[in-house]
Image (cartoon, rainbow, N blue to C red):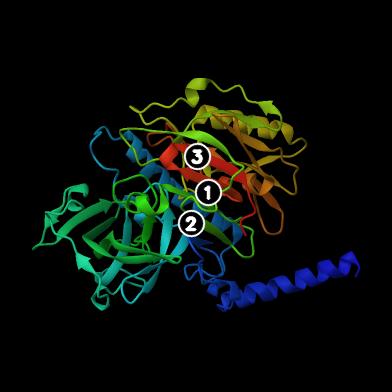
Amino acid sequence: MPMKTHLLKLLLALPLFFFLAQAGFNPKCDIKDQSSTLKVYHIYSPCSPFRPQKPVSWGESVLQMFAKDQARLQYLSSLVGAKKSSEPIAWGRNIIQSPTYILRVNIGTPAQTMLMALDTSNDAAWVPCSGCIGCSSTVFDSAKSTTFKPLGCQTAECKQVPNPTCGGSTCTFNLTYGGSTIAANLSQDNITLATDPIPNFTLGCIQAATGTSVPPQGLLGLSRGPLSLLSQTQNLYKSIFSYCLPSFKSLNFSGSLRLGPVGQPIRIKYTPLLKNPRRPSLYYVNMVGIRVARKVLDIPASVFAFNPTTGAGTIIDSGTVYTRLVQPAYIAVRDEFRRRIRNATVTTLGGFDTCYSGPIVAPTITFMFAGDVNMTLPIDNILLRSSAGSISCLAMAAAPDNVNSVLNVIANMQQQNHRIVYDVANSRLGIARELCS
């Protein structure tokens, strides 16, 4: 069959695919999670009930994600800027940020399926519970679970919560962030991840929320905090997990979260995970340089230096969309990127300052980490491109200058189509290319 005929058939099939997706028809959405591996879906996936119900223009969607990232960066910077070393990471404050990736978690007996945000910079699991005032989506009906139980103020778990109160015998707490306020009870129930049953899992049960940014169905924290999934399942998963995040352009929009040592890549390079005693939950790595095409940029080592006192350094984060670099690093990347794209006029789009009209040939960008680990980004991880190909933007930005801008954040768009292995037991992080969809 001639190539033109193949192409014509593909182009004709795409609108049908998207029509069926909008109608809720996608056979791959019903595929069950297997063993200790869970499907990870982008919130705009055809399998996600949180995708926009009305068509959103490409430009508008870019600006919306950038605005959400600004709030995310403020959250992360508030963590690294806090001075108290004994205070747990600000529990749940970022659950009111819109998630980028979600997965299915079965909670209770009989099981109720909740779609929870995947978040590597959060310490705990959270779900809106039945009777929640101000929750706007599916809630977990705790009264229907025979294994659900609230935790009292004298329990060891309650002592991990900042400023708990006792409204009766239950461990309760309140959080405020921006224009939103959350009240929750600390509880336990059985959960199932893929086919792995986990009894007596501690989670927050949201009772009341004000504001418009409360998470639709909850959040699953994968950081190193005492009540994170990683800590609560240490015997089962040995403090190891990995994920592969799908490309934003993937029709399937699905990747995977793999829990435990079984099935992790054998041939993969590792860089050390750094420990910040002030903020032990964040996943710091030692970025030592950045390369554009074959040129290693002249960026002072101090720009990347890890400083536990100030929180400076580089983290890997699943909840931020676009990579942010401290200003000297970003300017060096941007200027070299522009220099290599000749005969093209630079424009802007919202917070992105390096955009072009029409197609361009972009250079590769490589993040260089200690241990001779190089993360070379393919073009889909570097460029935001409109569906018509009329606009292309460098999908990175400088750290916001209105917050504690000492943190480089390697975000999920740059991580897509890589297997990222968090081997916390051995204090190392692995990076390898992998097609996730």
Are dots 2 and 1 in contact, CB under 8 Å? yes
Q: Which mark is residue 150?
A: none
Write down the residue under mark 3: 429
Callout 3 secondary element = strand
Gap between marks 1 and 3, in whole Å?
A: 15 Å
| Along the viewing direction, whichever of 175 and 369 lies nearer the viewer | 369
Write down the residue under mark 1: 412
Quadrant housing the N terminus? bottom right
Dot 1 amino acid type: Asn
Disc 3: CA contacts within 10 A as few (<14), some (14-19) or many (>=20): many
Are dots 1 and 3 in contact, CB under 8 Å? no
Q: Earlier in the sequence, mark 2 or mark 1?
A: 2
Residue in the picture at 33% in, 49% down = 231
Between disc 3 and disc 2, the foreground one is 3
Residue in the picture at 35% in, 32% down = 276
Residue in the picture at 67% in, 32% down = 292
